[in-house]
């Protein structure tokens, strides 16, 4: 990274006045952001909450069962016409 | 803000974050200027300044004074924020006022004419990042050696010694090219 230094000439007006800077001051927003950050920092991860973990496990199990049931149905449907087409001995 | 008042404000804010406001009000402008001269972008500076104070609030329970001004601790957080922003940049600009520049010119011992000053500016631009940081904090931000040390995570003596070494190197380079 290259750094360039720029010297502002003597007597030149300040680029930002204190009043302009003060417009960006917002203690309420800071406190709100702080409380939000604290909440996020101290939030219990999902896997550490037994109820949430069980609910998640249940959802995963149901999804697996539904997918398997659909697969089985599809396989049965695929096999059914081939049985009809077989010639009689 | 005098040292005792500042200490009281810190203790109060450590006990109750809602009481951080006096520290925020007092240091907002200097931290804003510190960042703005390194980014040159007003809105970005506002975001970074807000981030600095947020990080300061979150880290405040772990803060110990050790007799150094609170502002040096804030500068350290601010410098880290600026460095994270700079990481994505290939080239950055830093603004220095003529008075601040004069301080460095006098310290290096450059006779007051344009050519020498331009050369000094080029030498400064070519210094390594760590060396530039020492000069910036000491001569452009006006920090004491103790504060420079705290910002950079080194002792006061080390900050003083390293700064003098950088100045000597700059004088040598100026002399060699004369």
Image: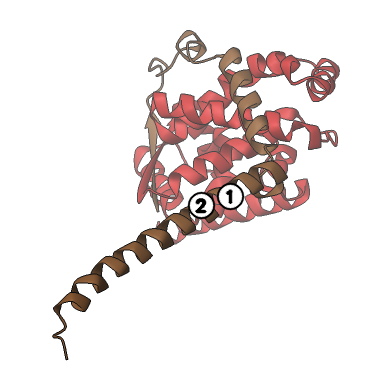
Chain colours: A brown, B red
Q: Chain of mark 2?
A: A
Q: Are marks 2 and 1 in contact (CB under 8 Å)?
A: yes
Q: Quadrant of the N terminus of chain B?
A: top right
Could you say which quadrant of the image residue A61 lies in?
A: bottom right
Q: Position of residue B170 (x, y in %)?
A: 51, 53
> Residue, x 46% and y 40% (percent of image)?
B111
**Residue lying at the far bottom of the rendered structure:** A89
Tag 1 residue = A58
Horizontally, is A33 left or right of B9 in the view? left
Q: Quadrant of the C terminus of chain B?
A: bottom left
| The label number, if any, that marks residue A62 in the structure image | 2
Residue sitting nearer the eye, A47 or A1: A47
* In the depicted structure, whether residue B106 falls above or below residue A53: above
Name the subunit of mark 1. Answer: A
Above or below, B117 relative to B47: below
* In the displayed structure image, the side of residue A55 where residue B119 appears, left or right: left
* Nearest to the observer: residue A29 or residue A61: A61
Q: Position of residue B87 (x, y in %)?
A: 44, 50
Q: Residue at x 82, y 15 (%)?
A: B5
Label 1 Cα crowd, 10 Å radius (few <14 / some 14-19 / many 20+): few
**Helix, strand or loop status at disc 1:** helix
The crowd level at tag 2 (other Cα within 10 Å; few <14, some 14-19, many 20+) is few
Residue placed most toward the observer, A24 or B72: A24
Residue at the limit of the structure toward the front, as seen here:
A89
- For the point 46% across and 28% down, the residue is B45
Q: With A89 as the anchor, is A47 left or right in this view?
A: right
Label ID, residue B166: none
């Amino acid at each position: 990274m290259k750094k360039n230094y720029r010297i502002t000439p003597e007597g030149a007006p300040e680029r930002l006045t204190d009043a302009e800077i003060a417009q960006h001051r917002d203690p309420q927003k800071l406190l709100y952001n702080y409380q939000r950050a604290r909440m996020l920092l101290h939030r219990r991860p999902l896997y550490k909450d037994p109820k949430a973990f069980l609910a998640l496990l249940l959802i995963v199990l149901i999804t697996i069962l539904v997918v398997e049931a659909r697969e089985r149905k599809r396989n049965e449907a695929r096999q059914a016409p081939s049985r009809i087409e077989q010639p009689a001995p | 803000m005098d040292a005792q008042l500042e200490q009281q404000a810190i203790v109060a804010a450590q006990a109750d974050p809602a009481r951080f406001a006096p520290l925020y009000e007092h240091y907002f402008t200097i931290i804003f200027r510190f960042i703005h001269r390194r980014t040159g972008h007003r809105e970005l500076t506002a975001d970074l300044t807000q981030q600095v104070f947020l990080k300061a609030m979150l880290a405040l329970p772990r803060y110990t004074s050790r007799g150094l001004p609170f502002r040096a601790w804030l500068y350290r957080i601010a410098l880290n924020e600026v460095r994270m922003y700079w990481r994505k940049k290939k080239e950055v600009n830093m603004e220095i006022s003529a008075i601040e520049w004069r301080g460095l010119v006098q310290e290096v011992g450059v006779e007051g004419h344009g050519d020498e000053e331009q050369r000094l500016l080029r030498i400064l631009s070519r210094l390594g990042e760590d060396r530039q940081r020492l000069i910036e904090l000491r001569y452009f931000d006006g920090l004491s050696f103790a504060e420079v040390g705290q910002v950079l995570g080194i002792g006061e003596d080390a900050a003083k010694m390293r700064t003098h070494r950088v100045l000597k190197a700059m004088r040598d380079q100026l002399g060699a090219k004369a």
